[in-house]
Image (cartoon, helix red, strand yellow):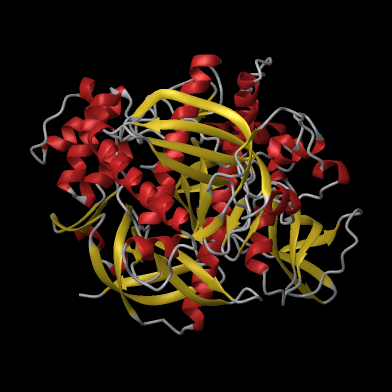
Amino acid sequence: MFQNNPLLTKLKKNLRAQIPRVEGIVKSNERGFGFLEVDTQKSYFIPPQNMKKIMHGDKIIALLKIEKDKEIVEPERLIEAYLKRFVGTIEKKNNTLFIIPDYPLLKNRIICHPDKNCMNIFQDGDWAIAKLTQHKLKGDHIFYAELNEKIAYKDDPFIPWWVTLAKHKIDKQEPIAEANDLILKENYPRKNLTDLDFITIDNINTKDIDDAIFVDEESNGNICLTVAIADPTAYIENGSKLDYIALKRSFTNYLPGFNIPMLPRNLSENLCSLHPNQCRPVLACRIIILKDGSISNNIKFFLAWIKSKAKLSYNHVSDWIEKSGSWIPPTKSIQKQILILHRLCLLRIKWRQINAVLFKDRLEYRFHLSENGSVIDILVEKRRISHKIIEECMIIANISAANFLSVNLGFGIYNIHRGFDSINAKNVVSFLRNYNLNFNAEEITTLKGFCHLKRVLNILSNDYIDNRIRRFQSFGDLSITPGPHFSLGFLEYATWTSPIRKYSDMINHRLLKAIIHKEKAIQPSETIKFKINEQKRRNRMAERDISDWLYTIFLKQKKYQNKKFYAEITDVSRNGMRARLIENGANIFIPGTLIHSIREEINLNQETGQVFINNIMRYKISDIIQIKLLDIRLDTRKIIAKIEF
């Protein structure tokens, strides 16, 4: 009687139209249900049966309903699928291929088939790139994907690298060099500095050596520093095919175990690299450092030929300065270079301590890998005096380049950092009052005031306060026009000392050369700046993802489950705390339920980075706590821990 009744159909539509709707992001749970996260404060429950039409991360519109006195949502329309192009593992069952996406909380078995351009043969356990072509919330009966490319066989020892690079769309091979790329194209006149005792200080295994330095003491006590930088733009013409490839990559990608160069290795590790006793073209800068540690206005940029007299390692130089170990400089002249460089370094550190900003030294962790990619050990490394020598020399060179570009052009690729915006400056002032530190917002939004604040905090040496203040700071950025770098404490800063590994430095090389030779300089575009920033973001994510993967493999192989470690709390979220193991640098997660079992009694305050139990502050970011590893999950690369009391 009511079948196909137009009035009833219209009534149903009207009733459905009156149901409230909400928009948000789907967050799935391992137990089958999920939540629709509308904002950081509000989410709605999605029952297991409603989760079958959607995936974790989908952006949807849903109907808001009441069932058994509880608000739930029913997915209605897909706004944007989380999965588009993705990577995953192949599962082969009854001659049917499935792909399981490699994303935490997204383990749907999706039926799939190679697309017409994919010639690979897929077996169980292989890794592949796929594209989602059907979605249930779009009216399709099933989720369906097309396989585009095989990433790796299931037994490839380098799966963590190949999968991660594919996920982030990063090249895994060096660029291919053509014969013309290896020919020196510039015929500008160059000064012959091959007799000077230039040296390089780097890691012992470094092959792509960008910078060499030479110092000389003047009779008045000033120090003359000459920084010579490898000159790849003498080989790579602006707008050439290789130049386009370098822009696309933007950086040499340094990953655990190996690097993927921005330029062909024949350039980056051979023809351009400043190897000892090899004549190399360079872009050089000569700078006078005054007795008080300041940089004089007497700065000269020029092209030259140099011949490095020695490749020294950070550890050897540091040992010799610290009077430990058996290594000694190979010649008296190189010994003299190291001594003057050491004096220059201490002079500049003292100057920056008073006039700019110094960073605190932090532990660094490095994977020691076998040839087949197995983690042998994780090494803890500290920055030593030789690292600081090179750092100070490069900072001097970059300040000088920024000034040279600003005076002569008014544009370049500058590294900028704006400190605090006006709103966050007020938040900082309010926060610091809790610790009897009195500043005003107008003061700390100036470069001078920001530097003063940082110097006060360095003296105070409170890691929790430092962390909270960093949360209020703006992000660093690149800029086409000059601007201050608050975090370094300089009016302007432009890097040019790593052109083998950074495309932005190649751009600045071309601009510096245009000034030297009085040629027309081409101003970089905002598009180029955006591409460099985007590639930097991808590279950082890839390095983090590979490291997390290697940490889980290492801890699992060492059978460290239930082992106790000391860890530093690095973040507090509404679900728990994150911490870093001090022994090896692994990032772990401590769920709120394992901090305190009674949910109503615990407050995980993300804003302040503190954890309260029964209104008493028990933990905060920067605290060192003892933890026990509970679960090391290879599939999600997550390490779960609990606090040991």
Q: In this view, does 123 lie to the left or right of 18?
A: right
Q: Please provide percent x and percent y for residue 528.
A: 64, 29
Classify 32 as above or below 490.
below
On the rendered structure, is 416 left or right of 128?
Answer: left
View extreme (left): residue: 436
x then y, percent, for residue 13: 62, 34
Front position in the image: 606 or 534: 534
Q: How many labels does the image show?
A: 0
Residue 132 visible somewhere in the drawing: no
Q: Is residue 132 above or below residue 381?
A: above
The residue shown at (64%, 25%) is 513
User: What x and y, as percent, mark residue 201?
Assistant: 49, 54
Choose between 281 and 36: the one closer to the eye: 281
The one of 337 and 29 positioned closer to us in this rendering = 337
* Quadrant into which the N terminus falls: top right
Q: Residue at x 85, y 74 (%)?
A: 95
Q: Nearer the viewer, residue 329 or 433?
A: 329
In the picture, residue 604 is in which quadrant?
bottom left
Q: In this view, does 290 lie to the left or right of 101?
A: left
Residue 30 in the image: x percent, y percent?
A: 50, 65
Q: In which quadrant of the rendered image does the C terminus lie?
A: bottom left
What's the residue at 7%, 38% (across, down)? 436
Q: Is residue 512 visible?
A: yes
Residue 507: name its quadrant: top right
The structure residue drawn at horizontal position 82% and vertical position 77%, both measured from the top left corner, is 94
